[in-house]
Image: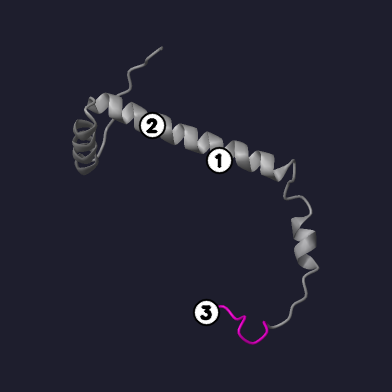
Amino acid sequence: MSTNTYPLKLPASVKEAAARLAKADGVSLNQWIASAVAQKVGAVETANTFLERRAGGASGDGLADMLEKVRDVSPTDGDELRGK
């Protein structure tokens, strides 16, 4: 495994919480932070892959044209936005 050093500045409260959790897990703070970052990277990349697959090459092209075709009518009773 290749590693790089990265100086990380955390708010004191976040560092304290991370240190507490790392100790509870029995790992170093560095290991705990590396694992947390790896989990986040995996989640974001998985979500991006899922959404790209789900979109199936769709784009926003034509969306404005489609929305222009929506009739301008008042909502039916009970279908209004709350607070308006």
Q: Which residue is mark 3?
A: 82
8 versus 70 height, above or below? above
Residue 76 percent coordinates (x, y): 68, 84
Residue farthest along the bottom direction in this orientation: 77
Nearer-N-terminus badge (2/3)? 2
Going 73% across and 41% down the picture, which residue do you hit? 56
Residue 48 quadrant: top right
Q: Residue 46 location, x and y as percent? A: 55, 36
What residue appears at the point 68 percent right and 39 percent down from the top-left corner?
53
Q: Residue at x 77, y 50 (%)?
A: 61
Question: Does the magenta stretch mainly form a helix, a strand or a loop?
Answer: loop
In the picture of the structure, the residue carrying the numbered disc 1 is 47
**Percent of width and height locating residue 8:** 29, 29
Q: Position of residue 57 (x, y in %)?
A: 75, 41
Check disc 3 and give the amino acid type. Answer: Arg
Position of residue 19 in the picture relative to residue 84 (left or right): left
C-alpha distance separating marks 2 and 1: 15 Å
Q: Amino acid at mark 2?
A: Val
Q: Which mark is residue 37?
A: 2
Circle 2 packing at 10 Å, graded few (<14), some (14-19), many (20+), is: few
Q: Are marks 3 and 1 in contact (CB under 8 Å)?
A: no
Magenta-highlighted residues: 75-82
What amino acid is labelled 1 in the image?
Ala
- The label shown at residue 71 is none
- Label 3 crowd (10 A; few <14 / some 14-19 / many >=20): few
Q: Secondary structure at mark 1?
A: helix
- Left or right: where 73 falls relative to 27: right
- How far is mark 2 from mark 3, CA to CA? 39 Å
Furthest residue in direction top, as rendered = 2
Q: For the residue labelled by badge 3, is the local secondary structure a helix, a strand or a loop?
A: loop
Q: Residue 78: say if magenta.
A: yes
